[in-house]
Amino acid sequence: MHSFLQKIAFPFLLLTGFFAGAQVKFTASISPAQIGKDEYAQLRLMVENAQVVQRIIPPRLNNFIIVSGPNQESGMSMVNGNVKKFVALSYVIKPKRVGSFSIPPASASADGAAYKSNAVTLKVTSVSSGNPGINPLSSPFGSIDPFADAPPESTYRDYILRKGEIPTEKIKKNMFVKLEVDKTSCFVGEPVIATYKLYTRLRSVSNMTKNPSFNGFSVIDMQQADNMYSRTEKLGGREYNVYNIRQVQLYPLLPGNLDLGVAEIENDVQFIKAEYADQQGNLLGQMFRDFSNAAIPPEGMENRKVILQNKPVSILVKPLPEANKPAGFKGAVGNFQITAAIEKNNFTTDDAGKLGVVIKGVGNLQMVTAPEINWPEGIEGYEPKTIDDLYKNVTPVSGRKMIEFTFTVAKPGKYDIPALEFSFFDTKDGKYKTVATRPVGFTVTKGSGKPQQIDTTQNKTAKEPLLTRFFSNRWRVVSLIAVLIILGLIFWLKSDNKKEKKLREQEEAEKLAAVNEPVDEIIHGQENPLAAAEESLQRKDGKAFYLTLNQDLKNYLSHKLSIPLEELNKKNISERLDKKGVINETSLQLHALMDEIEWQLYTPFTENEKMKETYEKAYDLVQLLNTYRS
């Protein structure tokens, strides 16, 4: 965890022009300043009024468990004509032991300068502080504006425990978990939205101890527990503070009565005894928000721990009708379109053809499978490769599934791939529908008789080095001899050209000295390695954009990871990123981006509206990788 904290950094490109005269400020804060050993605190590192924040490096947190974070924030506000903006990292931390801990200053790079924050101190006691601190379930950050007033939260006096009242009964009346669904009956494959909510009129620290299970459903999360937000709802004539615990889209896989899982929430509920609450006078209005301000002694508090569960809900899932079901139907439910295009209309028998198929629309896209192709005689097709591009925060899920079919042709001539059909069940109209592509024609001419090596694996997208492909089809003995010969040649060439190499290095050093800018500084943000792609983006030239972005990104990775351009592939990239300590999530994001660019390179229906989004993904990843030194 510590190595990750040392290296975490991120780019924030904010609006410029308003802040030219504002002073950059970097501060750290801890809230609350005193907690019990089983309670939580929030550490916040904030840079204010910087035009560009290159990175924020948190301090060592060896004495704490990081419950949540780093959570990125950014925003701006205007008060009496005064414009302020900020970027920040937030962490929810839990102490490992009792004591007084000094958290050292954090570091930040902003507008080309280095900054240090202030140190902060957190006191941890062996007993509850009487302050609920930070609830890791309710995520106190999200999109908070630190310059604005805190959002109003409804306060209720139910946390006051009067004589004769039973705490468990008060909890039962004022706190519960509820499961809401948008429908209780649907077809197989039709989405159901399920929302788990915590209703409360009390003050508590709440944690999810059991996630609901969804047997018989395909699940897409719309909101996880660490993204909870609060609002006020009225139920049974009473108002509650309501938190969304979890929200999911469920796609039933089989008919029948399917039960939705039960969520368990553990709550440490705090009451104030009435006799102590009455002594506080005007402080009662603030007590619900922050008990620490009321200075209630331990004997004036009553704590109860309770585990709450939602009532079970059953969904009646109806089977899809058998009447008029198309022969090629494979379970797609929603509303879809299908298009197909070929990479090149003319190629030789030495080359591999590529057919791109896109299925787009709304529905259970994640369960859509590739259509079957009746390849004409003389064409050999291989297993397809698919890329999902889904928008998961809309209902039903929308987006597209991109499918690449690779094939070879043995004899020259003119060929036609027949129209591809795709069938789905439209729940709105209650009937099956079939859409189809247009036939795809192409011409194949006679080649030299030396066919290219075809990559038929689904997960391998980058071309491997020529030698690797050559040796993969030869015996081990022949491979070994060939390697020894090549090594001998390399040794001879290096010896023969030693002087020339030194001369080139000297010339390069002189050039770099002339501009007085080290290569490492250029790679780390002084120049944009994606500049050529950015120019194409501004011209709105889709084809040129993806070509230049592909080349710019590969050039950058080759230099950054010290991999020769001709040897750049996913396996080598993953290995080098791992050696540099780059987290797996970043590596997966990079591979997904490369797949997306590759798809756009050969498909004739380039989507220009996605250029800006693709460029921003690439730029953010480059900036993130720049934080890992070569």
Image: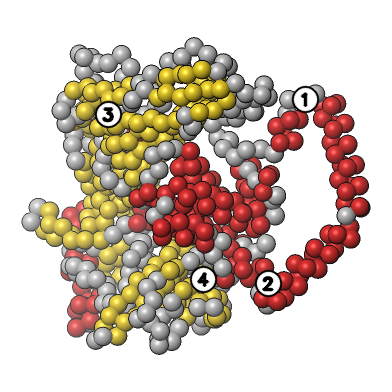
Q: Which x, y percent locates residue 482?
A: 85, 33
- Separation of marks 1 and 4 at Cα, in angstroms: 49 Å
Nearer-N-terminus badge (1/4):
4
- Separation of marks 4 and 2 at Cα, in angstroms: 18 Å
> Mark 1 touching mark 3, by CB under 8 A?
no
**Within-10-Å neighbours for mark 1: few <14, some 14–19, many 20+:** few
Q: Which x, y percent locates residue 109?
A: 54, 75
What residue does disc 4 label? Answer: 54
Residue under the image location 58 percent in, 35 percent down: 460
Q: Which x, y percent locates residue 261?
A: 31, 38
The image quarter containing residue 297 is bottom left
Mark 3 is on which residue type? Val
Residue under the image location 88 percent in, 42 percent down: 489
What residue does disc 1 label? Answer: 474
> Mark 2 touching mark 1, by CB under 8 A?
no
Mark 1 is on which residue type? Arg
Mark 4 is on which residue type? Gln
- Separation of marks 2 and 1 at Cα, in angstroms: 44 Å
**Within-10-Å neighbours for mark 4: few <14, some 14–19, many 20+:** many
Residue under the image location 67 percent in, 21 percent down: 449
